[in-house]
Image (spheres, rainbow, N blue to C red):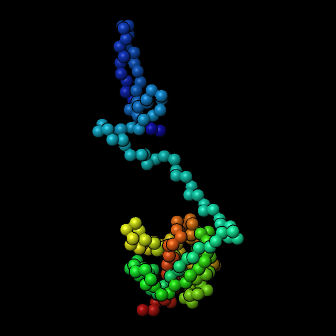
Amino acid sequence: MSAAVLSFSIIEARTSKPKLRLQTSVGENMAGAAEPQKRQSGRPFPPSARGPPPPPRPRFEPVDREKTCPLLLRVFTKPQIGGHHSKEDFAVRGKEPKDEVQIYTWKDATLRELTDLVKEVAPAARRRDARLSFAFVYPDKNGRFVVREVGKTFSYGNVRRLDDSKTLGELSFEIGDYLDVAIMSAELSSVR
């Protein structure tokens, strides 16, 4: 329900009886379309916080892997305490971290698929208690790198997370972004 303020004005006709006319503060133009409500200063009010919920986020369309060329995904793993590589580790082109794996994949690859691929090349990711944290590394509009965490998985699928089924496309991956994977486990965090 809109919070329209109603006001009445008296219209005087040539007759002796005055008539009432209804006006709303939302205002309607001659065509009947509602105009946005405005403050006394003339600026419109911000949109109402209440309203219909936003439309559901569209699912990323699956890729026909037989007909679509895969993309090269540069994956950097870090099996140490402290999480992801810092953005300074990517600041100089050609001097990225050395623990790199290059994977050919598609934008509909899930974090579970990437977890299984990382387990093939990183021994720390094969531990039963290993957790993998994924982050995209990309330049911002000023050219400085940003590290943005996008999901976490467990090394073994007996414990499922909601992030397992997220695809690169759903997470707003763009071709050219790097993937940084922090491998964490109870044993690695107890070693100092």
User: Could you say where residue 139 lies in the image, as x and y percent from the top left?
Assistant: 43, 71
Question: Of residues 153 and 28, which is closer to you in this image?
Answer: 28
Residue under the point 37% across and 27% down: 7
Q: Residue furthest left?
A: 41
- Is residue 155 toward the left or the right of residue 91 in the image? right
Question: Of residues 107 and 167, which is closer to you in this image?
Answer: 107
Q: Quadrant of residue 114?
A: bottom right
Q: Residue furthest top?
A: 15
Residue under the point 60% across and 77% down: 104
User: Could you say where residue 67 lies in the image, as x and y percent from the top left?
Assistant: 69, 68
Number of numbered discs: 0
User: Could you say where residue 105 lies in the image, as x and y percent from the top left?
Assistant: 61, 75
- Is residue 60 toward the left or the right of residue 23 in the image? right
Q: Is residue 32 above or below residue 151?
A: above
Residue under the point 56% across and 85% down: 125
Question: Of residues 93 and 136, which is closer to you in this image?
Answer: 93
Residue under the point 41% across and 68% down: 140
> Which quadrant would the C terminus be assigned to in this image?
bottom left
For residue 9, say whether it is visible: yes
Q: Is residue 149 above or below residue 45?
A: below
Q: Residue furthest bottom?
A: 191
Q: Quadrant of residue 8?
A: top left
Q: Quadrant of residue 170?
A: bottom right
Q: Is residue 18 above or below residue 188?
A: above
For residue 115, say whether it is visible: no
